[in-house]
Amino acid sequence: MNRSALLAAAAFMALGFGAHELLPVTPSHAAPPQQQAVPQSMAQVQLTFAPVVKRTAPAVVNVYTRSVVQQPVNPFFNDPFFRQFFGGSDGLSRQRVQQSLGSGVIVRGDGTILTNNHVIQGGQDIVVALSDKREFKAKVVVADPRTDLAVLKIDGKGEIFPTLAFADSDRIAVGDLVLAVGDPFGVGQTVTMGIVSALARTQVSASDYQFFIQTDAAINPGNSGGALVTTDGKLVGINTSIVSNSGGSVGIGFAIPSNMARRILEGASSGGVKLAWFGADGQAVTSDIARSIGLPKPGGVLLKNVFPGGPADKAGLNVGDVVLAVDGVPVDDMQALNYRIATHKAGDAPTMKVATNGQTRDVSVKLALPPETPRQATTIGGRNPLTGARVENLSPAAALDLQLEPTATGVVVVSPGRSIAANQGFAQGDIVRSINGQAIKNVGDLNRALGQAGGHWDMIIDRGGRRLTLSVDG
């Protein structure tokens, strides 16, 4: 045995194999070599995404917002009780300029731009900077906090701007290559590449209409509102948020699908965003629920509230039915169902796969706009626990705006403001159910009950499906 063979045998014995277990290596036992090909042309050597970036980058813009806020000189003046006595005069506060940075995508040649609502929210001056360094003042056409999307418009005085065409976001798949284009950290336009790492992410936002494409393409602060682009140069998503403990990219970023963005853009052209209404609310089907209702596996939305006379009710759906899919696309929770409804228009009739008592059937549901009733929006006065809060009557339309259950009724807190109500802990979306035993059905009931309390208020509040009690002596 030569020296090489001895060394090989010793190595195998050190790993716990006896020399007698060695097999002779012959060509018939050898692993086939990997198939590697040498580039056959200069074009193959120079494969690059540069042509795609060259076409798409001019349509991605930077969005700067500026707002002026009043900042109290003394922190005591944050307290509304101090402001009642001393007011908010210029002598007790100073102005501070807040600036924020994001990105946007030109989607129409006339200067119409899509971005995130959170990029421009509260901004008093909005400036859009193009990739060629020119800057334009922008006006807000639509700002929709429900979907976190906004539409801006710049005036190019007849100039036709470069645009991005929409891709069908329902046609992308996990593993597809994508490019993220935006202005992270304000360093200038940046392009990163990754793959679609997941679809239909819904549990990453408080909004009922968030339904994200997940990507590992680097997305950082300043990328919000920028473009997620397919390798053929089409807009498949609006980059929106990341998961990170440090504030920087860790490879989990989220984009709002282009089909939702296109729906908001259509609404901007027709006088406002009016999302279609299903008229029911539900919860995700867990393994335990699936076993109890005879489904073979978890999935779908179990209906727990159906609005009388609404689209779901007219289609024959009932509490206890399970919506498994919309237009052939599975839905696993209420956010996914809301997203599928929101990408349709009122009057559309999507086909839903529905399970009832373990049996499935297809149901056509004609969608509608949510019914509206007089909201009676009021700011509560006097001296009581709700002083300063803005409230209104609930209807399906109001519930949709506030992302509450579509069957919710009563009086809802639209904004507690910086007021006594805020100090008492009231928050947007709180529904006042009763005061001192009196049921509250509308704003008139609320004002009467507050005024007749005689300095003592026992209140029952609904907050996010929980019932809270509050007792206050004035």
Image (spheres, grey):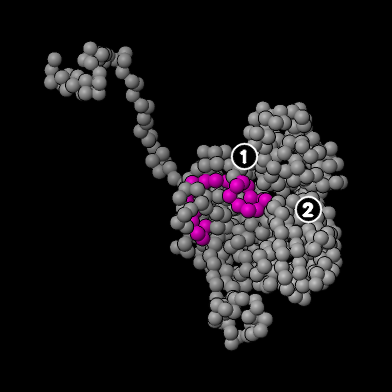
Residue beneath disc 2: 408
Between 92 and 136, the residue placed more toward the observer is: 92
Mark 1 → mark 2, Cα distance in angstroms: 35 Å
Residue 112 relative to residue 45: left or right: right
- Indicate the amino acid at tag 2: Ala
Work out whether residue 250 or residue 454 is closer to the camera in this orientation and state it.
454
163 vs 190, nearest the viewer:
190
Q: Which residues are magenta?
A: 202-223
Q: Is residue 410 above or below residue 136?
A: above
Q: Secondary structure at mark 2?
A: loop
The disc label shown at residue 436, or none: none
Mark 1 or mark 2, whichever is nearer to me: 2
Would residue 211 be counted in the magenta stretch?
Answer: yes
Residue 173 drawn at (x, y percent) = 57, 38
Q: Which mark is residue 171?
A: 1
Q: Is residue 394 left or right of residue 140?
A: right
Q: Is residue 151 above or below residue 194?
A: below
Q: Is residue 142 above or below residue 30?
A: below
